[in-house]
Image: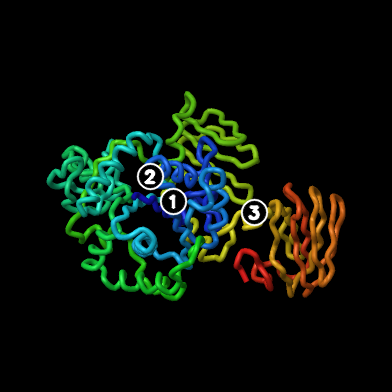
Amino acid sequence: MLIPVILSGGAGTRLWPVSRKAWPKPFMPIADGESLLKRTLRRAQAVASAEEVITVTSREHYFLSRDEYRGLIADADARFLLEPVGRNTAPAIAMAALDIAHRHGPDAQMLILPADHLIRDLEAFGHAVAAARRLAVEGYLVTFGIVPDRPETGYGYIRAGAELGEGREIAAFVEKPDVATAEAYVASGDYAWNSGMFCFAVGALFDAMAETCPELLAGARAAYAANEGGGSPFEFDKAGFAALEDISIDYAVMEKARRRAVVPAAFDWNDIGSWKAISDLDPGDESGNRTEGPAVLVDSRNCFVRSQGKLVAAVGVDDLVIVDTGDAVLVSARDKSQAVKQVVDMLRANRHEAANVHTTAFRPWGSYTVLEDAADCKVKRLVVKPGHVLSLQMHHRRSEHWTVVRGTAKVRIGDEEKLLHRNESVYIPVETLHRLENPTDEDLHLVEVQCGDYFGEDDIVRYEDRYGRV
Protein backbone atom coordinates (compact mmCIF):
# COMPACT_ATOMS: atom_id res chain seq x y z
CA MET A 1 0.00 0.00 0.00
CA LEU A 2 1.27 3.47 -0.95
CA ILE A 3 -0.10 6.46 0.93
CA PRO A 4 0.81 9.94 -0.31
CA VAL A 5 1.60 12.47 2.42
CA ILE A 6 1.30 16.09 1.32
CA LEU A 7 3.31 18.55 3.43
CA SER A 8 1.54 21.90 3.34
CA GLY A 9 3.15 24.01 6.01
CA GLY A 10 5.58 26.43 4.35
CA ALA A 11 5.19 30.20 4.54
CA GLY A 12 6.44 31.01 1.04
CA THR A 13 7.81 34.38 2.11
CA ARG A 14 9.75 34.83 -1.14
CA LEU A 15 6.41 35.08 -2.95
CA TRP A 16 5.10 37.99 -0.90
CA PRO A 17 2.82 39.93 -1.32
CA VAL A 18 0.63 37.15 -2.76
CA SER A 19 1.85 34.45 -0.36
CA ARG A 20 1.37 35.41 3.30
CA LYS A 21 1.12 33.59 6.61
CA ALA A 22 -2.69 33.36 6.51
CA TRP A 23 -2.76 32.40 2.81
CA PRO A 24 0.60 30.82 1.88
CA LYS A 25 2.17 29.57 -1.33
CA PRO A 26 0.30 26.23 -1.73
CA PHE A 27 -2.97 28.13 -2.23
CA MET A 28 -1.56 30.41 -4.93
CA PRO A 29 -3.10 29.90 -8.35
CA ILE A 30 -0.44 29.72 -11.03
CA ALA A 31 -0.67 30.47 -14.74
CA ASP A 32 -3.57 28.09 -15.47
CA GLY A 33 -5.57 29.27 -12.45
CA GLU A 34 -5.19 26.07 -10.39
CA SER A 35 -3.43 26.18 -7.03
CA LEU A 36 -0.21 24.32 -6.30
CA LEU A 37 -2.02 22.34 -3.58
CA LYS A 38 -4.66 21.11 -6.04
CA ARG A 39 -1.95 20.11 -8.48
CA THR A 40 -0.14 18.19 -5.75
CA LEU A 41 -3.32 16.32 -4.83
CA ARG A 42 -3.88 15.38 -8.47
CA ARG A 43 -0.28 14.18 -8.69
CA ALA A 44 -0.72 12.07 -5.57
CA GLN A 45 -3.90 10.50 -6.90
CA ALA A 46 -2.23 9.72 -10.21
CA VAL A 47 0.41 7.45 -8.65
CA ALA A 48 -1.23 6.01 -5.53
CA SER A 49 -2.99 2.66 -5.72
CA ALA A 50 -5.01 3.50 -2.59
CA GLU A 51 -7.51 6.34 -2.49
CA GLU A 52 -6.34 7.75 0.85
CA VAL A 53 -4.25 10.92 0.86
CA ILE A 54 -2.84 12.44 4.06
CA THR A 55 -2.22 16.17 4.33
CA VAL A 56 -0.11 17.62 7.13
CA THR A 57 -1.02 21.27 7.68
CA SER A 58 -2.09 23.66 10.43
CA ARG A 59 -5.54 24.25 11.90
CA GLU A 60 -5.37 27.74 10.42
CA HIS A 61 -5.09 26.25 6.93
CA TYR A 62 -7.23 23.13 7.40
CA PHE A 63 -10.47 24.66 6.15
CA LEU A 64 -8.76 26.29 3.17
CA SER A 65 -7.18 22.95 2.26
CA ARG A 66 -10.46 21.08 2.64
CA ASP A 67 -12.16 23.58 0.33
CA GLU A 68 -9.37 23.19 -2.25
CA TYR A 69 -9.86 19.42 -2.22
CA ARG A 70 -13.63 19.53 -2.61
CA GLY A 71 -14.71 17.85 -5.81
CA LEU A 72 -11.33 16.14 -6.28
CA ILE A 73 -11.41 13.59 -3.46
CA ALA A 74 -14.08 12.21 -1.15
CA ASP A 75 -14.03 13.65 2.36
CA ALA A 76 -13.54 10.15 3.78
CA ASP A 77 -10.38 9.64 1.70
CA ALA A 78 -8.74 12.98 2.60
CA ARG A 79 -7.14 12.63 6.04
CA PHE A 80 -5.79 15.79 7.66
CA LEU A 81 -3.11 15.88 10.38
CA LEU A 82 -2.90 19.27 12.06
CA GLU A 83 0.26 20.80 13.51
CA PRO A 84 -0.26 23.17 16.47
CA VAL A 85 3.08 24.87 15.64
CA GLY A 86 5.57 24.63 12.78
CA ARG A 87 8.35 22.10 13.43
CA ASN A 88 9.97 21.47 10.04
CA THR A 89 9.74 18.29 7.99
CA ALA A 90 11.22 15.64 10.31
CA PRO A 91 8.55 15.94 13.04
CA ALA A 92 5.78 16.24 10.45
CA ILE A 93 6.90 13.13 8.58
CA ALA A 94 7.44 11.19 11.81
CA MET A 95 3.91 11.94 12.99
CA ALA A 96 2.45 11.00 9.60
CA ALA A 97 4.42 7.74 9.68
CA LEU A 98 3.06 6.94 13.15
CA ASP A 99 -0.46 7.59 11.92
CA ILE A 100 0.01 5.29 8.92
CA ALA A 101 1.60 2.56 11.04
CA HIS A 102 -1.26 2.78 13.56
CA ARG A 103 -3.88 2.24 10.87
CA HIS A 104 -2.08 0.20 8.18
CA GLY A 105 0.98 -1.42 9.74
CA PRO A 106 4.76 -0.96 9.30
CA ASP A 107 4.96 -2.31 5.75
CA ALA A 108 2.83 0.47 4.29
CA GLN A 109 4.82 2.87 2.12
CA MET A 110 4.57 6.63 2.27
CA LEU A 111 5.25 9.07 -0.55
CA ILE A 112 6.26 12.51 0.76
CA LEU A 113 5.16 15.38 -1.48
CA PRO A 114 5.69 19.06 -0.60
CA ALA A 115 2.62 21.07 -1.59
CA ASP A 116 4.55 23.82 -3.35
CA HIS A 117 6.18 21.83 -6.17
CA LEU A 118 5.11 21.96 -9.80
CA ILE A 119 5.47 18.81 -11.92
CA ARG A 120 3.69 18.62 -15.25
CA ASP A 121 4.96 15.31 -16.69
CA LEU A 122 2.88 12.94 -14.58
CA GLU A 123 3.82 9.89 -16.67
CA ALA A 124 7.55 10.34 -15.99
CA PHE A 125 6.75 11.12 -12.35
CA GLY A 126 4.79 7.86 -12.10
CA HIS A 127 7.73 5.87 -13.50
CA ALA A 128 10.07 7.42 -10.92
CA VAL A 129 7.65 6.63 -8.07
CA ALA A 130 7.37 3.01 -9.23
CA ALA A 131 11.17 2.70 -9.21
CA ALA A 132 11.35 4.25 -5.75
CA ARG A 133 8.73 1.83 -4.43
CA ARG A 134 10.77 -1.17 -5.61
CA LEU A 135 13.78 0.12 -3.67
CA ALA A 136 11.61 0.92 -0.65
CA VAL A 137 10.51 -2.73 -0.52
CA GLU A 138 14.19 -3.58 0.01
CA GLY A 139 14.33 -1.29 3.04
CA TYR A 140 15.86 1.78 1.40
CA LEU A 141 14.91 5.34 2.27
CA VAL A 142 14.49 6.77 -1.21
CA THR A 143 14.62 10.35 -2.40
CA PHE A 144 14.13 11.75 -5.88
CA GLY A 145 17.12 13.47 -7.44
CA ILE A 146 16.26 15.92 -10.20
CA VAL A 147 18.61 15.58 -13.17
CA PRO A 148 20.10 19.11 -13.43
CA ASP A 149 19.80 21.02 -16.69
CA ARG A 150 21.88 23.98 -15.52
CA PRO A 151 24.48 24.82 -12.83
CA GLU A 152 21.94 25.96 -10.24
CA THR A 153 23.34 27.52 -7.04
CA GLY A 154 20.01 27.78 -5.23
CA TYR A 155 19.51 24.06 -4.59
CA GLY A 156 21.23 21.46 -2.47
CA TYR A 157 22.70 18.47 -4.36
CA ILE A 158 22.89 14.72 -3.91
CA ARG A 159 26.05 12.84 -4.92
CA ALA A 160 25.14 9.41 -6.24
CA GLY A 161 27.18 6.31 -5.45
CA ALA A 162 26.93 2.68 -6.56
CA GLU A 163 24.10 1.64 -8.84
CA LEU A 164 21.02 -0.04 -7.39
CA GLY A 165 19.05 -1.20 -10.39
CA GLU A 166 16.86 1.78 -11.32
CA GLY A 167 18.47 3.97 -8.66
CA ARG A 168 21.79 4.59 -6.98
CA GLU A 169 23.06 4.62 -3.44
CA ILE A 170 23.44 8.05 -1.90
CA ALA A 171 27.10 8.86 -1.34
CA ALA A 172 26.51 12.29 0.20
CA PHE A 173 24.24 15.29 0.50
CA VAL A 174 26.01 18.55 -0.33
CA GLU A 175 24.99 22.12 0.42
CA LYS A 176 24.22 24.80 -2.14
CA PRO A 177 27.39 25.32 -4.23
CA ASP A 178 28.97 28.33 -5.89
CA VAL A 179 28.78 28.64 -9.68
CA ALA A 180 32.09 26.90 -10.45
CA THR A 181 31.26 23.98 -8.18
CA ALA A 182 27.76 23.68 -9.62
CA GLU A 183 29.21 23.56 -13.13
CA ALA A 184 31.52 20.73 -12.06
CA TYR A 185 28.59 18.86 -10.49
CA VAL A 186 26.55 19.04 -13.70
CA ALA A 187 29.50 18.01 -15.86
CA SER A 188 30.25 14.95 -13.71
CA GLY A 189 26.83 13.34 -14.13
CA ASP A 190 26.99 12.08 -10.55
CA TYR A 191 25.00 14.88 -8.92
CA ALA A 192 21.29 15.66 -8.80
CA TRP A 193 19.21 18.39 -7.20
CA ASN A 194 17.70 17.45 -3.87
CA SER A 195 13.95 17.59 -4.55
CA GLY A 196 12.68 17.14 -0.99
CA MET A 197 10.39 14.27 -2.08
CA PHE A 198 10.76 10.82 -0.50
CA CYS A 199 9.41 7.28 -0.55
CA PHE A 200 9.91 4.63 2.14
CA ALA A 201 8.16 2.04 4.28
CA VAL A 202 7.19 3.42 7.67
CA GLY A 203 8.96 0.53 9.41
CA ALA A 204 12.22 1.35 7.60
CA LEU A 205 11.85 5.01 8.60
CA PHE A 206 11.38 4.06 12.26
CA ASP A 207 14.46 1.80 12.14
CA ALA A 208 16.54 4.64 10.72
CA MET A 209 15.19 7.20 13.20
CA ALA A 210 15.99 4.86 16.08
CA GLU A 211 19.64 5.16 15.03
CA THR A 212 19.86 8.75 13.80
CA CYS A 213 17.41 10.69 16.02
CA PRO A 214 16.02 8.44 18.78
CA GLU A 215 14.90 11.36 20.97
CA LEU A 216 12.84 12.82 18.15
CA LEU A 217 11.22 9.44 17.47
CA ALA A 218 10.42 8.91 21.15
CA GLY A 219 8.96 12.40 21.45
CA ALA A 220 6.86 11.89 18.32
CA ARG A 221 5.53 8.59 19.67
CA ALA A 222 4.49 10.28 22.91
CA ALA A 223 2.88 13.21 21.09
CA TYR A 224 0.92 10.86 18.82
CA ALA A 225 -0.15 8.58 21.68
CA ALA A 226 -1.58 11.57 23.57
CA ASN A 227 -4.32 11.90 20.94
CA GLU A 228 -4.28 8.39 19.45
CA GLY A 229 -7.57 7.25 18.00
CA GLY A 230 -8.65 10.67 16.79
CA GLY A 231 -10.49 11.01 13.53
CA SER A 232 -9.89 13.50 10.74
CA PRO A 233 -8.82 16.16 11.26
CA PHE A 234 -6.38 14.65 13.76
CA GLU A 235 -4.70 17.29 15.90
CA PHE A 236 -1.26 16.59 17.30
CA ASP A 237 -0.83 17.07 21.02
CA LYS A 238 0.25 20.69 21.37
CA ALA A 239 2.73 20.39 24.24
CA GLY A 240 4.28 17.19 22.94
CA PHE A 241 4.60 18.36 19.35
CA ALA A 242 5.97 21.77 20.32
CA ALA A 243 8.72 20.03 22.30
CA LEU A 244 10.01 18.17 19.22
CA GLU A 245 13.22 19.38 17.61
CA ASP A 246 12.76 21.84 14.74
CA ILE A 247 14.76 19.95 12.11
CA SER A 248 14.43 18.78 8.51
CA ILE A 249 14.17 15.12 7.51
CA ASP A 250 17.44 15.58 5.56
CA TYR A 251 19.44 16.60 8.63
CA ALA A 252 17.66 14.32 11.09
CA VAL A 253 17.59 11.12 9.03
CA MET A 254 18.65 11.10 5.39
CA GLU A 255 22.20 12.42 5.88
CA LYS A 256 22.93 9.77 8.53
CA ALA A 257 20.89 6.70 7.57
CA ARG A 258 22.65 3.57 6.33
CA ARG A 259 20.22 2.35 3.64
CA ARG A 260 19.40 5.32 1.48
CA ALA A 261 18.97 5.64 -2.26
CA VAL A 262 18.24 8.19 -4.95
CA VAL A 263 16.13 7.69 -8.05
CA PRO A 264 17.26 9.96 -10.89
CA ALA A 265 14.12 11.81 -11.93
CA ALA A 266 13.94 13.07 -15.48
CA PHE A 267 10.55 14.73 -15.07
CA ASP A 268 10.16 18.51 -15.07
CA TRP A 269 10.32 19.98 -11.58
CA ASN A 270 10.01 23.45 -10.11
CA ASP A 271 9.80 24.24 -6.41
CA ILE A 272 8.27 27.69 -7.17
CA GLY A 273 10.63 29.38 -4.75
CA SER A 274 10.62 32.93 -6.14
CA TRP A 275 8.86 35.32 -8.48
CA LYS A 276 11.53 34.58 -11.06
CA ALA A 277 10.48 30.93 -10.92
CA ILE A 278 6.86 31.97 -11.41
CA SER A 279 7.75 34.20 -14.35
CA ASP A 280 9.81 31.44 -15.99
CA LEU A 281 6.69 29.23 -16.29
CA ASP A 282 5.58 31.31 -19.27
CA PRO A 283 7.83 32.00 -22.28
CA GLY A 284 6.33 35.49 -22.59
CA ASP A 285 5.69 37.65 -25.64
CA GLU A 286 8.20 38.73 -28.28
CA SER A 287 9.81 41.09 -25.75
CA GLY A 288 9.99 38.42 -23.04
CA ASN A 289 7.27 40.12 -20.99
CA ARG A 290 4.74 38.08 -19.01
CA THR A 291 1.56 39.52 -17.51
CA GLU A 292 -1.25 38.29 -15.26
CA GLY A 293 -4.11 40.72 -14.86
CA PRO A 294 -4.48 44.22 -16.38
CA ALA A 295 -1.09 45.55 -17.55
CA VAL A 296 0.40 47.75 -20.25
CA LEU A 297 4.13 47.57 -21.03
CA VAL A 298 5.85 50.08 -23.31
CA ASP A 299 9.48 49.79 -24.43
CA SER A 300 10.05 47.18 -21.70
CA ARG A 301 11.65 43.75 -21.82
CA ASN A 302 11.80 40.56 -19.74
CA CYS A 303 9.36 41.86 -17.14
CA PHE A 304 6.77 39.96 -15.11
CA VAL A 305 3.65 41.87 -14.02
CA ARG A 306 0.87 40.43 -11.87
CA SER A 307 -2.07 42.60 -10.82
CA GLN A 308 -5.18 41.64 -8.90
CA GLY A 309 -7.34 44.47 -10.17
CA LYS A 310 -5.45 47.70 -10.75
CA LEU A 311 -4.02 48.54 -14.15
CA VAL A 312 -0.22 48.42 -14.00
CA ALA A 313 1.71 50.40 -16.62
CA ALA A 314 5.48 49.99 -17.05
CA VAL A 315 7.51 52.19 -19.40
CA GLY A 316 11.16 51.77 -20.39
CA VAL A 317 12.09 49.12 -17.81
CA ASP A 318 13.85 45.77 -18.11
CA ASP A 319 14.05 42.60 -16.01
CA LEU A 320 11.57 43.67 -13.33
CA VAL A 321 9.00 41.81 -11.25
CA ILE A 322 5.94 43.94 -10.41
CA VAL A 323 3.21 42.43 -8.23
CA ASP A 324 0.17 44.41 -7.05
CA THR A 325 -2.27 42.80 -4.59
CA GLY A 326 -4.34 45.89 -3.86
CA ASP A 327 -2.89 46.56 -0.43
CA ALA A 328 0.79 46.11 -1.35
CA VAL A 329 3.06 46.51 -4.38
CA LEU A 330 6.33 44.67 -4.95
CA VAL A 331 8.90 45.97 -7.42
CA SER A 332 12.04 43.86 -7.72
CA ALA A 333 14.81 43.05 -10.15
CA ARG A 334 14.03 39.55 -11.48
CA ASP A 335 17.41 38.20 -10.39
CA LYS A 336 16.93 39.63 -6.87
CA SER A 337 13.48 38.16 -6.21
CA GLN A 338 14.94 35.61 -3.73
CA ALA A 339 15.57 38.59 -1.42
CA VAL A 340 11.85 39.33 -1.04
CA LYS A 341 12.03 37.33 2.20
CA GLN A 342 13.94 40.25 3.72
CA VAL A 343 10.93 42.49 3.07
CA VAL A 344 8.73 40.10 5.04
CA ASP A 345 11.29 39.98 7.86
CA MET A 346 11.21 43.78 8.08
CA LEU A 347 7.41 43.87 8.05
CA ARG A 348 7.24 41.30 10.85
CA ALA A 349 9.84 43.21 12.88
CA ASN A 350 7.58 46.28 12.60
CA ARG A 351 4.44 44.22 13.34
CA HIS A 352 2.91 45.18 10.01
CA GLU A 353 -0.26 43.25 9.13
CA ALA A 354 0.78 42.97 5.48
CA ALA A 355 3.30 40.29 6.49
CA ASN A 356 0.50 37.96 7.54
CA VAL A 357 -2.87 38.81 6.01
CA HIS A 358 -4.42 40.16 2.83
CA THR A 359 -7.25 42.66 2.60
CA THR A 360 -9.28 39.53 1.84
CA ALA A 361 -9.00 36.96 4.63
CA PHE A 362 -10.38 33.43 4.40
CA ARG A 363 -12.21 31.81 7.28
CA PRO A 364 -13.87 28.40 7.74
CA TRP A 365 -17.27 30.02 7.13
CA GLY A 366 -16.24 32.08 4.07
CA SER A 367 -14.21 35.27 3.73
CA TYR A 368 -14.10 38.97 4.43
CA THR A 369 -12.52 41.85 2.53
CA VAL A 370 -11.44 45.04 4.29
CA LEU A 371 -12.85 48.01 2.36
CA GLU A 372 -11.64 50.70 4.75
CA ASP A 373 -9.50 50.63 7.88
CA ALA A 374 -9.42 54.00 9.65
CA ALA A 375 -8.78 55.13 13.22
CA ASP A 376 -12.48 55.46 14.03
CA CYS A 377 -14.10 52.78 11.86
CA LYS A 378 -13.47 49.64 9.86
CA VAL A 379 -15.60 48.49 6.92
CA LYS A 380 -15.69 44.91 5.64
CA ARG A 381 -17.58 42.92 3.04
CA LEU A 382 -18.41 39.46 4.38
CA VAL A 383 -19.22 36.39 2.27
CA VAL A 384 -20.75 33.52 4.26
CA LYS A 385 -20.94 30.15 2.54
CA PRO A 386 -24.25 28.24 2.42
CA GLY A 387 -25.11 26.50 5.67
CA HIS A 388 -22.22 28.06 7.58
CA VAL A 389 -22.34 30.03 10.80
CA LEU A 390 -19.95 32.41 12.54
CA SER A 391 -19.09 31.95 16.20
CA LEU A 392 -21.31 33.19 19.01
CA GLN A 393 -19.23 36.15 20.10
CA MET A 394 -19.00 39.64 21.53
CA HIS A 395 -16.59 42.61 21.44
CA HIS A 396 -15.42 44.90 24.24
CA ARG A 397 -14.27 47.84 22.14
CA ARG A 398 -16.46 48.09 19.08
CA SER A 399 -20.06 48.05 17.91
CA GLU A 400 -21.11 46.68 14.52
CA HIS A 401 -23.71 47.38 11.84
CA TRP A 402 -24.62 44.61 9.38
CA THR A 403 -26.37 45.32 6.06
CA VAL A 404 -27.37 42.46 3.76
CA VAL A 405 -26.54 43.13 0.12
CA ARG A 406 -27.22 39.64 -1.25
CA GLY A 407 -28.97 36.60 0.19
CA THR A 408 -30.69 36.03 3.53
CA ALA A 409 -29.04 36.19 6.96
CA LYS A 410 -30.13 34.62 10.22
CA VAL A 411 -28.85 36.81 13.05
CA ARG A 412 -28.85 36.52 16.81
CA ILE A 413 -28.54 39.71 18.86
CA GLY A 414 -28.58 39.02 22.58
CA ASP A 415 -31.36 36.48 23.06
CA GLU A 416 -33.32 37.44 19.94
CA GLU A 417 -33.10 35.83 16.50
CA LYS A 418 -34.46 37.12 13.20
CA LEU A 419 -34.00 36.93 9.44
CA LEU A 420 -32.52 39.78 7.42
CA HIS A 421 -33.07 40.12 3.69
CA ARG A 422 -31.43 42.26 1.02
CA ASN A 423 -31.22 45.95 1.97
CA GLU A 424 -32.07 45.27 5.63
CA SER A 425 -29.74 46.14 8.54
CA VAL A 426 -29.13 45.38 12.18
CA TYR A 427 -27.09 47.08 14.94
CA ILE A 428 -24.94 45.16 17.46
CA PRO A 429 -23.96 47.25 20.51
CA VAL A 430 -20.66 46.86 22.35
CA GLU A 431 -20.47 43.82 24.67
CA THR A 432 -23.55 42.17 23.15
CA LEU A 433 -23.65 38.50 22.24
CA HIS A 434 -24.26 38.02 18.51
CA ARG A 435 -24.03 35.46 15.76
CA LEU A 436 -24.45 35.42 11.99
CA GLU A 437 -25.64 32.44 9.96
CA ASN A 438 -26.42 31.68 6.33
CA PRO A 439 -29.44 29.32 6.38
CA THR A 440 -29.76 29.17 2.58
CA ASP A 441 -28.05 27.29 -0.26
CA GLU A 442 -26.57 30.45 -1.80
CA ASP A 443 -23.72 32.73 -0.68
CA LEU A 444 -24.65 35.49 1.76
CA HIS A 445 -23.02 38.92 1.24
CA LEU A 446 -23.03 41.62 3.93
CA VAL A 447 -21.34 44.93 4.58
CA GLU A 448 -20.12 45.28 8.16
CA VAL A 449 -19.32 48.69 9.63
CA GLN A 450 -17.39 48.65 12.90
CA CYS A 451 -17.25 51.72 15.15
CA GLY A 452 -15.00 52.06 18.19
CA ASP A 453 -11.40 52.67 19.21
CA TYR A 454 -9.88 49.25 18.38
CA PHE A 455 -10.67 46.75 15.61
CA GLY A 456 -8.13 43.94 16.04
CA GLU A 457 -9.14 40.31 15.69
CA ASP A 458 -8.10 39.75 19.32
CA ASP A 459 -11.17 41.74 20.41
CA ILE A 460 -13.31 38.72 19.55
CA VAL A 461 -14.55 36.76 22.57
CA ARG A 462 -15.96 33.44 21.34
CA TYR A 463 -18.46 31.45 23.40
CA GLU A 464 -19.47 28.80 20.85
CA ASP A 465 -17.78 27.92 17.60
CA ARG A 466 -18.46 25.15 15.10
CA TYR A 467 -14.83 25.24 13.95
CA GLY A 468 -13.13 24.70 17.32
CA ARG A 469 -11.79 28.24 17.73
CA VAL A 470 -13.17 28.90 21.24
Residue positioned 47% across, 23% down in the render: 286
Upstream in the sequence, badge 3 or badge 1? 1
Mark 1–mark 2 CB contact (< 8 Å): yes
Residue 398 is situated, as x and y percent measured from the top left of the image, at: 76, 70
Q: Amino acid at mark 1?
A: Val
Q: Is residue 334 visible?
A: no
Residue positioned 31% across, 51% down in the render: 198
Question: Is 391 left or right of 82, judged from the image as shown?
Answer: right
- Label ID, residue 219: none
| Residue occupied by mark 3 | 359
Q: Nearer the viewer, residue 398 or 391?
A: 391
Q: Quadrant of residue 215?
A: bottom left
Q: Circle 2 sits in a helix, a strand or a loop, which is it?
A: loop
Q: Is residue 469 above or below residue 37?
A: below
Q: Is residue 284 above or below residue 86?
A: above
Q: Circle 1 sits in a helix, a strand or a loop, which is it?
A: strand
Mark 3–mark 1 distance (CA, rounded to whole Å): 32 Å
Label 2 crowd (10 A; few <14 / some 14-19 / many >=20): some
| Residue occupied by mark 2 | 48
Upstream in the sequence, badge 1 or badge 2? 2
Total numbered labels = 3
Question: Is 127 left or right of 238, judged from the image as shown?
Answer: left
Mark 1–mark 2 distance (CA, rounded to whole Å): 9 Å
Of tags 3 and 1, the one toward the viewer is: 1
Mark 2–mark 3 distance (CA, rounded to whole Å): 38 Å
Q: Nearer the viewer, residue 153 or 442?
A: 442
Mark 3–mark 1 CB contact (< 8 Å): no
| Residue occupied by mark 1 | 53
Q: Amino acid at mark 2?
A: Ala
Residue positioned 18% across, 37% down in the render: 187
Of tags 2 and 3, the one toward the viewer is: 2
